[in-house]
Amino acid sequence: MLGVCAPGGCGKTTSVTQLCRDEQVIRMIMISLSLARAHSEFRPKVQSGLA
């Protein structure tokens, strides 16, 4: 998660909108989500001794 703080009118919304449309950023978000999902599925197996 990334927080963006600045006074009104500084372009926060415009900057974040452009950032979220960037192909590299989208790929990194997708990779992060995939890793988070893999971790959440793997952890219970490790804890139960099945992995």
Image (cartoon, helix red, strand yellow):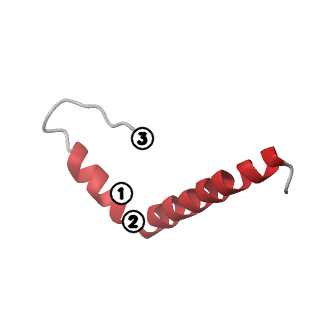
Q: Residue at x 33, y 37 (%)?
A: 4
Q: Residue at x 86, y 49 (%)?
A: 49
Q: How many marks?
A: 3
Observer-nearest residue: 35 or 48?
48
- Rendered location of residue 24, percent (x, y): 49, 66
Badge 1 element: helix
Report how far apart the C-alphas of labels 2 and 1 lie in the structure: 5 Å
Observer-nearest residue: 32 or 41?
41
* Residues at marks 3 and 1 touching, judged by CB atoms closer than 8 Å: no
Report how far apart the C-alphas of labels 3 and 2 lie in the structure: 16 Å
Mark 2 neighbour class, 10 Å CA radius: few under 14, some 14 to 19, many 20 or more? few
Residue at the limit of the structure toward the bottom, as seen here = 23
- Rendered location of residue 32, percent (x, y): 57, 56
Q: Residue at x 60, y 58 (%)?
A: 37
Q: Is residue 39 left or right of residue 18?
A: right
13 versus 10 height, above or below = below
What kind of residue is marked 3? Answer: Leu
Badge 3 element: loop
What kind of residue is marked 1? Answer: Leu
Q: Which residue is mark 1?
A: 19
15 versus 23 height, above or below = above
- Rendered location of residue 30, percent (x, y): 51, 64
In the rendered image, which quarter is residue 19 located in?
bottom left
Q: Earlier in the sequence, mark 3 or mark 1?
A: 3
Mark 1 neighbour class, 10 Å CA radius: few under 14, some 14 to 19, many 20 or more? few
* Residues at marks 2 and 1 touching, judged by CB atoms closer than 8 Å: yes
Observer-nearest residue: 47 or 8?
47
Q: Which residue is mark 2?
A: 22
Q: Earlier in the sequence, mark 3 or mark 2?
A: 3
Q: Which residue is mark 3?
A: 2
Q: Is residue 38 left or right of residue 6?
A: right
What kind of residue is marked 2? Answer: Asp
